[in-house]
Image (cartoon, rainbow, N blue to C red):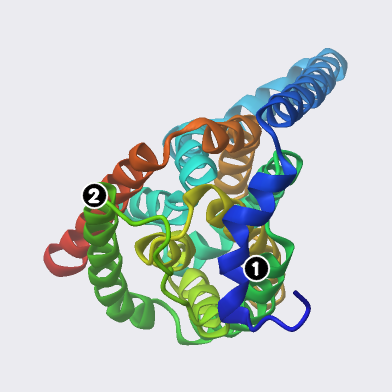
Amino acid sequence: MSNNTPEEIIEEITYSHEMVLTTQELTSSRRKVFNKYMIAISVVVLVVLFTYLFLSANQLTELQAALQKDNNLFYWMLLVGFTAEIVAGSMGMGYGVICTTILLILNVPPTIISASIHSAESFTSAAGSISHWQLGNINKKLAKALAIPAIIGAVAGALLLSYVGERYAKITKPFIAIYTMYLGIRILQNAFTKRDSNSKKKNVNITALGLIGGFIDSVGGGGWGPLVTGTFIKNGHTPRYVIGSSTFAKCILTVASAVTFIFTIGIHHWNIVAGLLIGGIVTAPFSAMLTSKLPTKKMFIAVGIVVIFCSLITIYRAIFL
């Protein structure tokens, strides 16, 4: 196993994990994740309640005014983060694309969009990665092979977007959207195509895919899932383990991207980051459990529809708005 090339790593995913995790063990893992998560939620709720109790009337007024800033943007981001993480955590794609699309509609500058999304996603993807790890959805070799080039691509993309700015993002977005829409169509085709279980899956150049995926994700505010996860699924690989490993690698690249943005442009729009962060963390572990339970065909269909829909929105905005 240690002599495997990166392209061969993915071939081990289905067999190695299915042998390790029985149905009973998987159910037990889900229960443990749920119990730990409920404890974490309880702690957070208690902290929020005590915070409100110790704040003065003036401080509460200031806090409420801050939350209602920019036409209640915090509350809208709370809803967006909640919804986007359900999609991303359970299907391995869509978080950045959904958040970017909505923030563009709200006229937030692309550099701020990407910086805000990656700052929040550093925590939401970490929560999802922990759950995927405990549920046995992650292949260590695949995650490592993706993460290293993804970090390089993410840092390069963040630096480029910070210094070149909005124009470059607008030029690349339509082309990225066209490719992701193609992936969505192929994923839907895979859902209705009967595959021979003995047939060999198509190899993927993991290093190149991780590098390009990290770069695109930083420049466009999203795109890792549709490009990386979508490519693996399109080539016939099992969604559950691809999604788990991809989410883990995504967590690492978002941290690299967020840190780069902090050093280049600083921290902006805390209400966007806080809303996306809280909404996403509440959802992340449950979406990871959903990955383990969904049948492969239904996951193909769901992922394909989400990718096509988000790509069409991006293309429309790039051409007509």
Q: Residue 253, image x and y in percent?
A: 65, 68
| Cα separation between marks 1 and 2 | 28 Å
Residue 265 visible in the displayed image: no
Vertical position of residue 193 compared to residue 146: above or below: above
Is 23 left, or right, of 308 in this rendering? Answer: right
What residue did someone put label 1 on? Answer: 142
Vertical position of residue 142 compared to residue 239: above or below: below
Vertical position of residue 123 compared to residue 221: above or below: above
Counting residues from the start of the chain, the first of labels 1 and 2 encountered is 1
Q: Residue 223, image x and y in percent?
A: 43, 65
Element assignment for label 1: helix
- The residue at the point 37 percent across, 76 percent down is 169
Q: Which one is nearer the viewer's eye here, 110 or 233?
A: 233
Q: Residue 251, image x and y in percent?
A: 67, 58
Give the amino acid at mark 2: Phe
Q: Which one is nearer the viewer's eye here, 226 or 315?
A: 226
What residue did someone put label 2 on? Answer: 309
Residue 102 visible in the displayed image: yes
The quadrant holding residue 140 is bottom right
Vertical position of residue 274 compared to residue 311: above or below: above
Is 121 left, or right, of 311 in this rendering? Answer: right
- The residue at the point 28 percent across, 48 percent down is 191
Element assignment for label 2: helix
